[in-house]
Image: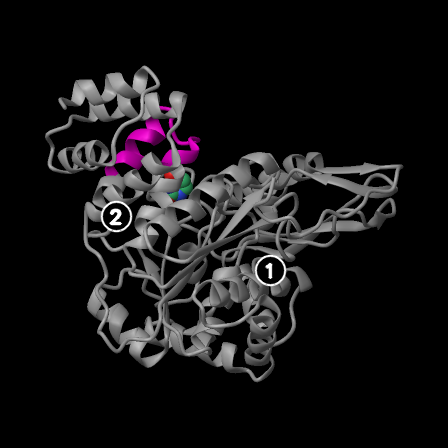
Amino acid sequence: MLPVEVIARKRDGGVLSSDEIRQFIADYTDGRVADEQMAAWAMAVYLRGMTSTETAALTDALRLSGQQFEWPSDAPPRLDKHSTGGVGDKVSLVLAPLLACCGVWVPMLSGRGLGATGGTLDKLCSIPGFRVDLGFDEILRALKSVGCVITGTTPGIAPADRKLYALRDITATVASIPLITASIMGKKLAEGLNGLVLDVKWGRGAFMKERAQARALAQQMVAAGQRLGVPTSAVISDMNQPLGKLCGNAAEVIESIAVLRGDGPADVRALTLRLGAEVLVAAGLSSGVESATTVLQGHLDSGCGFERFEQMVAAQGGRLAELPALASPSELASRRKGSVAAIDTEALGLAIVELGGGRRQPGDQIDPTVGLEYLVRLGDHVEVGQPWIRVFCRPEQRERVRHRLEAALLVTDEPVAPPPLILADGLAE
Ligand code: URA
């Protein structure tokens, strides 16, 4: 089919065959489909959607547009986790070394911050010297010596996705479940995995504001992974408040280390253990979530997880002892007495960006020392004057974020039930 026919078929709500999708993406990668045509097609997909079969074909086509990691035949199983992003989500920093303690390899390719959500690479880059531009040979070396690596997507991985994502970004076609599925899974599946777990977040600090959207995205991503031969599991988790307490770049490294040392907030630990257990079960390396959780908890308690983290940092050139101290703290107090009913979590993430902890424009320098400490939880009782958030920034920056933060807290007279961290019914309707 000509590109114009592929666009017209989708525009009219038709279904494309897997071969047609693969050819269209291959032609785009080679420059035989123009950006204008791809943008029109992306809008058609945005408006008309895709079947699961089409979504899996698009995922595969994006994956095949570039390099696939090829592992030695005697390599241990490769596992990974992907999160759709949130505020305070530092799970990758804890989970990668914990899984490495189980004898698997974790070749985790991560991203930078996006909008209000922090990026794993930006957090790790607050450790002086930490490199996130490893080539495949360096990844392999780190995996052989440590068992885990967290680095940026190498330029050879899914180049069609890089071009397509840049187009979607400027044509209002990002928020499409099939396009998000194919984009995320196309890159992940190029890692040559034996198991993948997805942390699909829903709520005020997430990409997906509604549970139903998060569930639909999780279902599509799991279906694409399974169809393409990678055992994939998903957890739908709450992002109506930050995960843990500390948010920001160096701040999240500090909290991750606390968790790896057997301390730190209970929600970070619980979500990390659950995601780790899910992927061990999905890959057939454990018989059940409960026994896998016990194994992972053992690696936390023994100090193995922290040891692997230190080794990973050193293998990637980082000097953990030189992690910068956080900027000076100040607190904001609740102006009402009552129950913490809602937190505009996205506003907290944007406050960090405003302080310099994220980018306003591509290429901006990040200040690793700024951040927030969230001192309450949804459902908590607060008194007038009780501090609910601590801000780490330069004194002259405080006023800049004060209004945004004050408007982010809703306190009501009625008691509020805290939301579950993980949706108990999983992907079921
Ligand atoms: N992250 C990605 O990599 N792709 C998307 O489409 C959305 C988020």
**Is residue 31 toward the left or the right of residue 274 in the image?**
left
Residue drawn at point x = 32 percent, y = 56 percent: 152
Q: Secondary structure at mark 1?
A: helix
Kindly indicate the quadrant of the structure image that contains residue 259: bottom right
Residue drawn at point x = 65 percent, y = 38 percent: 344
Kindly indicate the quadrant of the structure image that contains residue 5: top left
**Is residue 155 toward the left or the right of residue 376 in the image?**
left
Q: Nearer the viewer, residue 391 or 299?
A: 299
In this rendering, the answer to whether 319 lies above or below 19 is below
Q: Secondary structure at mark 2?
A: helix
How crowded pointer 1 is (Cα within 10 Å; few <14, some 14-19, many 20+) is rated as many
Q: Position of residue 36 (x, y in %)?
A: 21, 21
| Three-letter amino acid code of the residue under disc 2 | Arg
Q: Which mark is residue 21?
A: none
Q: Which mark is residue 271?
A: 1
- N-terminal of the pair, mark 2 or mark 1, is 2
Magenta stretch: includes residue 427: no
Residue drawn at point x = 36 percent, y = 35 percent: 179
Magenta stretch: includes residue 168: yes
Q: How are the colours assigned in the image?
A: one colour
Q: Where's ligand 1: which quadrant?
A: top left
Residue drawn at point x = 36 percent, y = 78 percent: 146
In this rendering, the answer to whether 214 lies above or below 169 is below
First to last magenta residue range: 163-179
Q: Give the CA distance from mark 2 to mark 1.
A: 28 Å
